[in-house]
Amino acid sequence: GKFLQLGPDAATQDFLEECRREWHPARDALAMYLRKFMCVTDANGWACRGQMHALTGEHIERLCGGRLTGRLLLDIGAGDGSVTKVVAPGFERVVCTEVSSPMIRRLRQQGWEAPDSADLNNPDLGAACYDCILLSNILDRIDAPQDLLTSCCRLLRPGGTILMALVLPWCPFVEGGTNKRPPKQPLPMTGGFCCQGAGFEESLQVLAEKV
């Protein structure tokens, strides 16, 4: 493996400036109110919040040795599409999966395909056909992360790219309405959990060796 340290580039600074410029207290108040009745992701979707910044185009070029291009891009757990739009310009067709209905609506508004079901066994998704699969902060937020990784191997074409972003140290949970609970199928991350006192390096090592 190879470690490549990335820092805040111009696109990152632009994102931060946009967040400051577009912040509105009414959106925050609406999201806080909605969280009494629904999960955080749905509340953010309805309140037009929840942007995620994981990678910029420059970061991807440094990590992958160039711009990602191809025919088909699949973004699993795409949220509002903030990460999708960074990678999407290099692909002819973009498919996003998401469990949150308000986020699905926002993805479709941007012109991307977003099925009603996030089931990766959906035959409409095809098999071994995607040039690139994005997993942005999703592996630690679902019930069956190992099944997800297996599905990615099935959906990815030979020689394709899986681009994954993770929050470490490891602290997985699943949104269930207004509550958070542990995943039903935990990954073998013993020694890498935040609650066990693991730091970034320890958690990453456990992930690389056991997952």
Image (cartoon, rainbow, N blue to C red):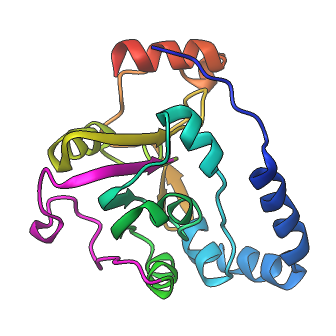
- Relative to 44, is 129 above or below? above
Q: On the rendered structure, is 30 left or right of 200?
A: right
On whether residue 133 falls in the magenta region, the answer is yes
Residue 55 visible, this orientation: no
Residue at the image position 34 percent from the left and 50 percent from the top:
133
Residue 23 image offset from top left, x and y in percent: 86, 75
Residue at the image position 81 percent from the left and 75 percent from the top:
28
Residue at the image position 66 percent from the left and 16 percent from the top:
197
Among the 4 quarters of the image, the one containing residue 69: bottom left
- Relative to 21, is 55 above or below? above
Residue 93 image offset from top left, x and y in percent: 32, 70
In the foreground, 58 or 28: 58
Per the rendered image, the range of residues in magenta is 111-136
Q: On the rendered structure, is 90 left or right of 86?
A: left
- Relative to 210, is 26 above or below? below
In the foreground, 94 or 22: 94
Position of the C terminus by quadrant: top left
Magenta span dominant secondary structure: loop
Q: On the rendered structure, is 211 left or right of 32?
A: left
Residue 166 image offset from top left, x and y in percent: 54, 37
- Relative to 61, is 122 above or below? below
The residue sitting at the front extreme is 66
Please state the total of marks drawn on the protein image. Answer: 0
Residue 195 image offset from top left, x and y in percent: 62, 24
Residue at the image position 59 percent from the left and 77 percent from the top:
45
Position of the N terminus by quadrant: top left
On whether residue 171 falls in the magenta region, the answer is no
